[in-house]
């Protein structure tokens, strides 16, 4: 079976990478689908987010990275991806994720949502926290892949 891991990935973190690496052992093919998200004010544009995500996961033969827009379930259906992978870091994530999975099931009952929890060292890492720390001049190198850390440093210097 094939799966997708959707998200904005602004930027991709080591927690995201951890989930993809573990999911890659469970599914034949994983599509990491980087959402265009016109409603969000992203730090990196879609091309940068796809490039950084691709670089971070380049060593995984059964993982591909692509941009997408529109409904996640529509993308999954069009690409024959029967599973949507979502990450749960804390109990606070559960309510939103439960609501999202229920709506997705209503829109496309043949697509399942599977939750993975990150390795304990990544449970507190989020893209928004990483962005904030980096833009305030903090070191985020332990939370993100090297290319992301470099890109964040460049963005911080430009601000």
Image (cartoon, grey):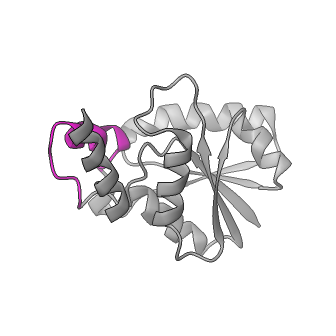
Q: Is residue 145 left or right of residue 158?
A: right
Q: Residue at x 24, y 40 (%)?
A: 156
Instruction: Tell me if residue 59 comes above or below residue 31 in the rendering.
Output: below
Closest to the observer, 136 or 1: 136
Q: Residue at x 74, y 38 (%)?
A: 105
x, y percent for residue 47: 56, 46
Q: Is residue 50 left or right of residue 152?
A: right
Q: Is residue 116 visible?
A: no
Instruction: Tell me if residue 61 comes above or below residue 91 in the rendering.
Output: below
Q: Which residues are magenta?
A: 124-141
Number of numbered discs overlaid on the protein picture: 0
The stretch drawn in magenta includes residue 125 = yes
Q: Quadrant of residue 69?
A: top right
In the image, farthest residue toward the top: 39
Q: Is residue 112 left or right of residue 39?
A: right
Q: Residue at x 51, y 31 (%)?
A: 96
The stretch drawn in magenta includes residue 40 = no
x, y percent for residue 140: 22, 53
Q: Residue at x 34, y 45 (%)?
A: 126
x, y percent for residue 25: 59, 76
**Figure quadrant of the N terminus:** bottom right
Closest to the observer, 125 or 88: 125
Closest to the observer, 35 or 55: 55
Q: Is residue 156 visible?
A: yes
Instruction: Tell me if residue 39 comes above or below residue 13 in the rendering.
Output: above
x, y percent for residue 28: 71, 73
In the image, farthest residue toward the front: 158
**Figure quadrant of the C terminus:** top left
């Amino acid at each position: 079976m094939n799966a997708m891991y959707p998200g904005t990935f602004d930027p991709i973190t080591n927690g995201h990478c951890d989930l993809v690496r573990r999911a890659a052992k469970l599914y034949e093919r994983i599509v990491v689908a980087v959402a265009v998200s016109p409603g969000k004010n992203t730090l990196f544009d879609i091309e940068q987010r796809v490039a950084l995500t691709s670089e971070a996961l380049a060593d995984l033969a059964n993982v591909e990275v692509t941009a997408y827009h529109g409904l996640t379930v529509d993308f999954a259906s069009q690409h024959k991806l029967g599973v949507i992978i979502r990450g749960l870091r804390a109990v606070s994530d559960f309510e939103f994720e439960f609501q999202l999975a229920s709506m997705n099931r209503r829109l496309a009952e043949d697509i399942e949502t599977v939750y993975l929890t990150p390795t304990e060292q990544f449970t507190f890492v989020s893209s928004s926290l990483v962005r904030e720390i980096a833009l305030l001049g903090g070191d985020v190198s332990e939370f993100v892949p090297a290319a992301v850390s470099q890109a964040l440093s460049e963005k911080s210097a430009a601000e």
